[in-house]
Amino acid sequence: MPGDQIQKFGGSWTEQKLEILREYLETYMKVMKKQPFHLVYIDAFAGTGYREQKQSVEEMGLFPDLASDESQSFLDGSVRIALRISRPFHEYVFIEASQIRYDELVRLRMETPQLVDRILVVKEDCNDYLEAYCRGTRWKGQRAVVFLDPFGMQVNWSTIRTMAATRSIDTWILFPLGVAVNRLLKKDGQIPDMWRRRLDQIFGTEDWFSEFYKEEDAETLFGKETRIRKSGTFESIARYYNQRLRDHAGFAGVADNPRLFCNSKGNPLFLFCFAAGNPKGAPIAMRIAQHILSKV
């Protein structure tokens, strides 16, 4: 996408992701402190409140080798970071489909007495809950920040569009660029139907195939044949997804410098994207997010 810059930095991608989120939440709450809105933080894959680097990748069942040499230190996850910012949200919604992690979040809620009345823990599929929540909320007096961190391909494009349609939600999306999407894009273009449907759901279109594959003529023993060749690279896939967010999801603005997260070997893992929901607030939200993405 012309003008877009895919940001790539060294160091732990897990730490970078969480620091970007923390700094945005801190700044967001300072900017909004005099606004008359009910402010909500929604974590759609809340987990346990702790994030451990190796396990978080291995749990996907896709690229366990990518994290084999990463540090094993435990880090505060997005839940605890959101709960510890200096100016708390009026409400927190933590969504987790796993029963074990849901139970841990319930315990975490009770361990945070100063905010216990503000925390809602939900055991449900994130797509189902977010779509119902967005359609059932009166957004005139409410704003939200949503953090989508699935470590896989669970987030549907329809959910993204539903959130954008509220015109009230700022969204951070961890797009599974290298750990899932690129893995499904086979070099010969022979993609199983089940994989195609999942790619259709995450991109919100079937046009991805013509973007990432080209026909080429090849000389064989039997004459000239037309073959399908994968032309999509990590960078072109990243640009395509961010462009889809900007031009087709319905957000008021999308950061043009999403962060590319790699593991210690330099293998691309995820693309961290930001989208602003409210047209009036989008300019400042974009400035804040793009500044953080460029420096953290």
Image (cartoon, grey):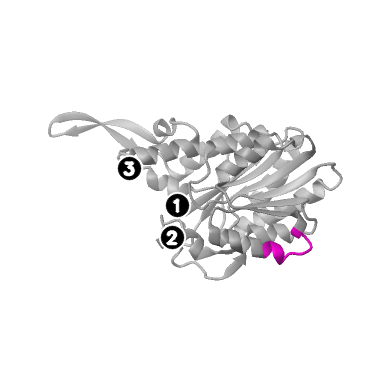
Answer whether residue 296 is visible to the viewer in this image. no
Q: Indicate whether residue 110 is drawn in magenta.
A: yes
As drawn, which residue projects farthest toward the left? 221
Residue type beneath disc 2: Leu
Q: Who's the residue at 66% across and 58% down the image? A: 79
Labelled disc at residue 187: 3
Q: Secondary structure at mark 1?
A: helix
**Which tag, 1 or 3, sits closer to the chain's start?**
1
294 on left or right of 230: right
- Pointer 1: what residue? 179
- Few, some or many C-alpha atoms within 10 Å of disc 2 (few <14, some 14-19, many ≥20)? many
Residue type beneath disc 3: Lys
Asked if the residues shown at circle 2 and circle 1 are in contact, with their CB atoms under 8 angstroms apart, the answer is yes
Q: What range is drawn magenta here?
A: 108-116
In front of the other: label 1 or label 3? 1
Q: Indicate whether residue 61 is drawn in magenta.
A: no
Q: Who's the residue at 76% across and 64% down the image? A: 113
**Which tag, 2 or 1, sits closer to the chain's start?**
2
As drawn, which residue projects farthest toward the right? 34
Answer whether residue 282 is visible to the viewer in this image. yes
Q: Who's the residue at 64% across and 57% down the image? A: 78
Q: Secondary structure at mark 3?
A: loop
Q: Quadrant of residue 279?
A: top right
In the image, residue 69 sits, relative to residue 23, either above or below, namely below
- Pointer 2: what residue? 66
